[in-house]
Structures are given as C-alpha cells and as structure tokens.
Image (tube, rainbow, N blue to C red):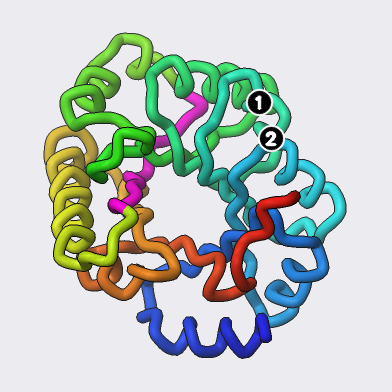
Amino acid sequence: MIQENLQKILANIPEGVTLLAVSKTKPESDILEAYNYGIRNFGENKVQEMVGKYENLPKDIKWHLIGHLQTNKVKYMASFVSLIHSVDSLNLLETINKEAVKVNRVIPCLLQFHIASEETKFGLSEDEAYALLESDSYKAMKNVEICGVMGMATNTENMDVVRSEFKHLKQIFDNLHEKYFVASTTFKTISMGMSHDYQIAIEEGSTIVRIGSSIFGERNYNV
C-alpha cells in the first residue's frame, strides 16, 4: 500500500514542492519500501530514533529533524542531519552551530513559528525571530544556515482557520526575506502542510509538505 499511497500523493504535488515522508515510529522496512519507490527525504521527531535508522539504512537518504529538539541531543545527529525544521530559540541555534563546528559542517535550519491557536505547539513569534536574527551571537555563527521557516497549523476541521495560519506563515517568510535575506540564494524553504491539509499548504506557498499517515498509515503510538 505504501507505494500506491505515494503514487497518489505525488500526483497531487507540483514540481518545486518536496515530499517529506514522515517516518517517525515506522519500521525500517516501511522506509525501505518508500525508498525503493524513489523517496529520499524522510522526517523524524526523535533524534535517537533517527540515529538508529540512519545507521541501518541507505546513506543517500536525507534525514530531516521535524520534532521539538533539545540542545543535549544535537550532537548525536550533527554529522548527518540534512535539515533541522524546528529551531525555536537562539540557545538551540547556538548549540547547533557549536556541534556543526566540531564536525566541520554547515547545518541547514528552519526557524519554527507558532502560528496555531493551540498553546501546546512550539515556535517563535515574529518579534522573537527578529531579535534572534539581530543578535550578535547569530551574526557570529558560521556553521548554521537559516534557509526558511516551518509551522504547524491548528488541529481543526475548519480549513478556513488552517488556510489563514498558512497565509500568516507565508507572510512571515516574506517579511524575513525582505528584512534579512534579500541577498540570500538559499532562504527559500517554507515547511508547512501535513496529510490532512497539504494541498491547502501548497496553494499558500509551501515548498516542503510533511506527510506521514497518508503514506504509512496511522502512527504506532506504542513504539
């Protein structure tokens, strides 16, 4: 079913939008099935789970960390992570930079914004992002690269609310681009949209959609 699901989803994703297969809690056999269909971008919530899969699976997979990231976990994935979607503080970015120096890499990162009505979701406000980008600490960093934004919409059946939140994230992206990244060739990523709302996200400007259950089936919460 995984490859059938991928076929349907890819038919609905335009060129220029990346499908990120969210493989958290899923077995390596499922990832390999998607890999054999041509998928190379996989998203994980937990560093420990991602490290285990990285060690066992093909090395041309691009691993994305999409879950809330604790500073003490950064070192375990600094050598291989392709993109960190969930930078929500200057302290975390400082840690990523420090660990990237140790492995002689520049790690691509997205700033995560709180666009939903639920308080439980993580993310920066626009003002907090400005403060981060204007800090001396950020300006001194040489081993991280901010290449866009990420956000999660409210978990609701009301797609008007979801669309409004995606529009808001696109506006934040545009504001940041104009204010801080107008000369950047790499600040171009908007990570928004999941299984139930990715088509709306694409309409509102998403460049990466994070799709799990529509590919792999419902998440296994016992893992």
Q: Amino acid under label 2?
A: Met
106 to the left or right of 110: right
Residue 137: percent from left, percent from top? 37, 11
As measured in the structure, the alpha-carbon distance from the residue carrying label 1 to the one carrying label 2 is 8 Å
Which residue: 33% across, 55% down? Answer: 155
Q: Quadrant of residue 103?
A: top right
Residue 25: percent from left, percent from top? 69, 54
- Is 54 magenta? The answer is no
The answer to which of 92 and 22 lies nearer the viewer is 22
**Residue farthest along the top direction in this orientation:** 136
- Is 148 magenta? The answer is yes
Residue 73's label in the rendered image is 1
Are the residues flagged by discs 1 and 2 in contact, CB closer than 8 Å?
A: yes
- Mark 2, secondary structure of its residue: helix
Q: Quadrant of residue 40?
A: bottom right
Quadrant housing the N terminus: bottom right
Which residue: 16% across, 25% down? Answer: 127
Q: Amino acid under label 1?
A: Lys
Residue 41's place in the image compared with 217, above or below, is above
Residue 77's label in the rendered image is 2
134 to the left or right of 89: left
Residue 180: percent from left, percent from top? 20, 33
Residue 218's place in the image compared with 109, above or below, is below
Helix, strand or loop: magenta stretch: strand
- Highlighted magenta segment, given as a residue range: 142-154
Give the number of marks. 2
